[in-house]
Image (cartoon, helix red, strand yellow):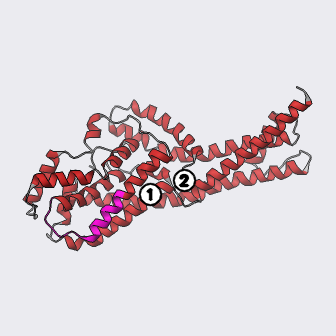
Amino acid sequence: MSSAVEYGLRVLAGVAGGWLIITTVSGAIRSFVLPRNESVRLNAFVFGGVRALFNFAARRAPTYAHRDRILAHYAPVGLVALPIGWLALVGIGYSGIYWALGVEDFTKSYELSGSSLLTLGTTSEAGLAINVFSYSEATIGLLLLTLLISYLPTIYQAFSRREIVVAQVELRAGVPASAAGLVRWLGHDHDFLNDDDQWLEWEKWLVEIDESHTSLPVLAFFRSPKSGRSWVLTAGLILDAANMLFSALNVPRSRQVELTFTAGVLALNRVHRFFENKSETEPAELRTPEELNATTPGRQEFADAWQSFRDADLPLRADEETAWRNYSERRMRYEPALKFLGALLMTPPTME
């Protein structure tokens, strides 16, 4: 190889290495520091690769319970794999820079990069420039690991707040949990206007889902501690309960219920759009047709809910068929998001 060609390759390797380092550090900052719903392609690549492995294993699981146990490890493993990917790319980037600065060959550059990244950056190589980059690499490596570790409490605090409401709704919605059961619990005293504090709490929960599950999208994939629970199903129960109040019951419409319903529709659709458009994430075919159909209430399910309201002596509207049409039309505002997220996250058919 002529000296001119080698010189050109070294310069190219240095430029490419600098670009790779900047891109990786920028991605890490946008992932955990920038308070916006940014989609980082590097993260999507890492999580996509990990998800492919878990999907392969989940497809061979005989039951939903087995699939759920497998996929419960996906988000934690993906989160741990993320800094490994960051460090690997930074190491490769600095290898190119060291080679451009005159290290003997790329193998020696990689050894120097690995030593700098995983220790304190001490090097016996001569030259101020190489030493400066060596110490900067050690600093960046420490920064990337610290960045993830410092944000783990934030992630798990948001997860804990989410799951408290999931468990509370499950307790109130009956066994198995249903929107009709939630409505009957709310109307136990036949005064739905006294429940504004409860609906306000759910509004705050849905607003936090909107913010946290797009700014920290890995949160969406953290599964509930109990296999029969899901934040997606909980959001669906709250929205279906509000929808039934509007459509089936002849009761005064609370402004707080309307706000909660609007917050839920916005939250689900924004999370849906984030994964479908920004992250370009497609659901895996891990659920049976029966499990998918079970997430959409049909005419018979509505008739059963109507009858349960009648048995509970709740004030019904005059015409059941009109109520069903109104319910179906309003549900189309959030049903596509529920179906997409249910397939993406492989939620259980119903909350048990």
Magenta: main secondary structure: helix
Any part of residue 15 in sight: yes
Q: Do the residues labelled 2 and 1 touch (CB within 8 Å)?
A: no
Residue 130: x and y, percent? Answer: 86, 48
Amino acid at circle 2: Glu
Q: Residue at x 25, y 45 (%)?
A: 296
Q: What's the mark number on residue 129?
A: none
- Asked whether residue 56 is drawn in magenta, I would say no
Residue 17 vertical placement versus 147 (above, below): above
Classify residue 313 as left or right of residue 284.
left
The quarter of the displayed image where residue 7 is located = top right
Amino acid at circle 1: Phe
Sort mark 1 into few (<14), some (14-19) or many (20+) by Cα contacts within 10 Å. some
Residue beneath disc 2: 38
First to last magenta residue range: 248-265
Residue 343: x and y, percent? Answer: 36, 41
Residue 30 vertical placement versus 3 (above, below): below
Residue 17: x and y, percent? Answer: 75, 42
Classify residue 133 as left or right of residue 167.
right
Quadrant where the image shows the N terminus: top right
Tell me the CA gap for discs 2 and 1. 20 Å
Depth check, front residue: 276 or 296: 276
Q: Residue at x 8, y 56 (%)?
A: 319
Sort mark 2 into few (<14), some (14-19) or many (20+) by Cα contacts within 10 Å. some
Residue 28: x and y, percent? Answer: 62, 52
Q: Which of marks 2 and 1 is nearer the N terminus?
A: 2
The quarter of the displayed image where residue 142 is located = bottom right
* Number of marks in picture: 2
The quarter of the displayed image where residue 203 is located = bottom left
Q: What's the mark number on residue 159?
A: 1
Q: Residue at x 25, y 42 (%)?
A: 294
Classify residue 343 as left or right of residue 42.
left
